[in-house]
Image (cartoon, rainbow, N blue to C red):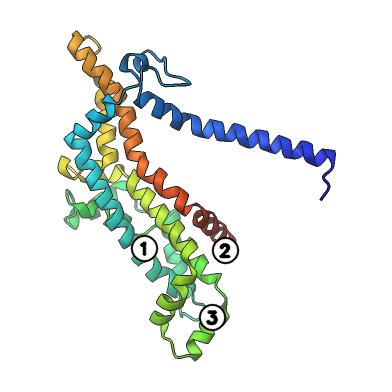
Amino acid sequence: MIRSRADKIFQMGITIIMVLVMIVTLYPLVLVVFNSISDATAVANGQVLWRPVGINFEAYQKVFENDDILTGYRNTIFYALLGTTINMVLTICAAYPLSRKKLHGRKVFNLFITFTMFFSGGMIPTYIVVQATGLIDTIWAMIIPTAMAVYNFVVMRSFFESLPEDIFEAASIDGANHLVTLFRIVLPLSKAGLAVIVLFYFVTHWNSYFNGLLYLNNKELYPMQLVLRNILLQNQLQDTGVDSMGRDAQLIGEVMKYAAIVVSSLPLMIIYPFLQKYFVQGVMVGAVKG
């Protein structure tokens, strides 16, 4: 196809804009990586801008020697895996029946569930409920209050609704009940939707720290993000009038926070490329029907 001069100019303009967007998006991440492997004094003086200065990996060594960080990392992996599993079970169990047009009271149930996405009890009533159910200072405080996200439910329900009705009619004629239809037909055809919802839930659990801040007092149960938050606060509150040894520890701590950010983000950066195509498909389907 022959493109006009205006089309070429437009294409070039779009390419330039996308490159600029990519640079703006990637630079903060690259800067964090550069700071994490640079000399502590250079980082403190703001000399690390476009490349690492005095490359060393002492910060990463300190991170992996820190028991709090390792405990938080282990806790976060546990919360993310268990929480995502529970999230997916509840989301599928709610989304599948409410995607069937023949379900009696379907509109009422959908209305009540969707209502909670816009109006909630708030932080204090939620805390009172969590406290009354005995979840304070337990692993379940990180999982049960966020057992299902309504937005993810809506996306999953929309995905199920997008499947051709003929499939369900054929399964019914063949004698398949709803469980067989769900596990043998619906879920295998919904891999894109399942992948994107798994990613949404996993990222939410991985980045969660507010629930831990509210409900956890035992440091042994802290998630990685809460440990990282405490490290950042400690570095900010440290007194600048310290001796040379204290100054050195403060400088190392400054670089450690960058290394901790990289370590905490690494699993998601590894997982995302494998789920990217499903992520795009799932978002597009979720945007078709609300």
Q: Tag 1's secondary structure?
A: helix
Residue identified by numbered label 1: 88
Compared across the picture, whether 268 is left or right of 239 comes to right
**Residue holding disc 3:** 167
At 31% across and 22% down in the image, what residue appears? Answer: 56
Location of residue 231 by image quarter = top left
What element does badge 3 sit on?
helix
The image quadrant where one finds the C terminus is: bottom right
Q: For numbered disc 2, what is the local secondary structure? A: loop
| Residue 241, picture quadrant | top left
Q: Of circles 1 and 2, which is in front?
A: 1
Q: Is residue 170 left or right of residue 37?
A: right
Q: Residue at x 19, y 33 (%)?
A: 66
First in sequence: mark 2 vs mark 3: 3
Q: Disc 2 marks which amino acid?
A: Lys
Q: Position of residue 39 (x, y in %)?
A: 33, 18
Task: Evaluate whether residue 218 shows in this view.
Answer: no
Residue 76, given in percent of the width and then of the height, sits at: 27, 47
In front of the other: 214 or 225? 225
